[in-house]
Image: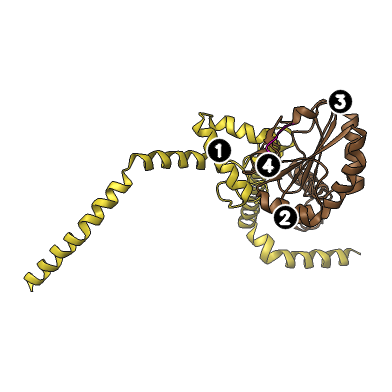
Chain colours: A brown, B yellow
Amino acid sequence: MTTHPQNIEPQKTVRWWQFALIGVMIMMFILFAAGLGRDTKFIPSPLIGKAAFNFDLKRLGAEKQIKLSDYKGKIVVLNFWASWCVTCREEHHILLESSKALQPSGKVQFIGVNSKDTDKAAFGFMDKRGHFPYPSVIDRQGRMALEYGVYGMPETFFINKNGVIAAKHIGALTHKILADKLKQAEAVQ
Amino acid sequence: MRQLIAFVCINMILITAPVSLFAAETVTTPQMKVESELEKKIRTVATKLRCPVCQGESVYDSHADVAVEMKRLIGDKLKAGESTEEILTYFKDRYGNFVLMEPPAEGLHWVIWVFPIFMALLGGLFLIQNLKSGAKELNDTKYDDFDQDDASDQDNSKVSEIEELRL
């Protein structure tokens, strides 16, 4: 006599949907793991590799207009700053030192964009921390910042000698970041 | 008493009538109508854009400086006759797909659109499979009620007794 059929354990079959579920879970795990390693502050700019917007704005503290096209043939370091921007204070000495060191060669030109600020506050900022040895243009409403897809201050664009945006940096600059981005600007045609 | 109520009612009408007339005139001012239409259009576009510095809010909902300026620019562009699509493209070209509240189903973004449908299908199949197996088990239990529940233990013990005798 054999044992009762009910006592025989039914053989478990792994169905296709179980495979699919495991596959999806693995995929989700990989996606989350990849996401954890990402710098959330880094948002790639669609402007990299494209022609920079040719602005024509009034110079801060002068009646002169400044155009980007005036500097064609030079690498332009376009720095968005404001007196109310706390991080701008961190990079201020970097900009002063670097511009003093690099501009005399004639290959690099620094331009500041004083965004959503007042002349009085901007000069107060520079009086306290040192005047830039290069011009700044006035972007009173912040339209120029929108034109360059700026998220927040400070942001720096590296425009190559052909007027193409080669690199961008969000946040305070360091000497190393500046040197790396300038190399990129030299390399990109 | 009736006279008193009538007096109060007449006075209330006399007091409120000029205010109502003034209010009605204010609401129907053509200039206000134009502004409200523009506001409506700005809202339509601004709700489709993500505030670049807030990340969880639309440009319309945000009070951040950049969002306020974006709303102003949307207004100016609408006044200049640009369409919603043209304005959205303008911001997309400068901020990338990130600035759109609904990213397009292209590149890796298709995962966002396909994944919920896929999971819903998978969940549905899982539910059907479980319901089917549940129903089958219920049927088996119903027909083999005696064998399974009451007698199985007794049967087993009897089988083991017989096997012991055989040995």
Please state which of the two labelled residues, at mark 1 or mark 4, is closer to the viewer: 4
Question: What kind of element bears circle 3?
Answer: loop
Label 4 Cα crowd, 10 Å radius (few <14 / some 14-19 / many 20+): many
Q: Would you place residue B167 above or below residue B24 in this image?
A: below
Could you tell me which residue is drawn at 69 percent across and 61 percent down? B148
Residue A85 visible to an observer of this rendering: no
Position of residue B106 measured from the top left corner of the image (x, y, whole percent)? 70, 32
Q: Are marks 4 and 3 in contact (CB under 8 Å)?
A: no
Which residue is under mark 1? Answer: B74
User: Which kind of residue does numbered mark 1 sit on?
Assistant: Ile
* A54 relative to A186 in the view: left or right: left
Mark 2 is surrounded, within 10 Å at the Cα level, by few (under 14), some (14 to 19) or many (20 or more) other residues, namely some
Q: Is residue B142 above or below residue B45?
A: below
Question: Is the C-beta separation of discs 2 and 3 under 8 Å?
Answer: no
Residue receiving disc 2? A124
Q: Earlier in the sequence, mark 2 or mark 3?
A: 2
| Residue type, numbered disc 4 | Ile
Q: Secondary structure at mark 1?
A: helix
Task: Give the CA distance from mark 2 to mark 1.
Answer: 33 Å
Give the residue number, with chain letter if any, for mark 4: A138
Q: Which residues are magenta?
A: A60-67
| Residue farthest toward the bottom in the current orientation of the protein | B1
Number of marks in the rendered image: 4
Residue A84 image label: none
1 and 4 marks on the same chain: no
Disc nearest the viewer among 4 and 3? 4
Residue tagged 3: A189
Task: Estimate the x, y position of residue B98 in percent, counting from the top left.
Answer: 69, 41
Q: Can residue A87 be found in the magenta stretch?
A: no
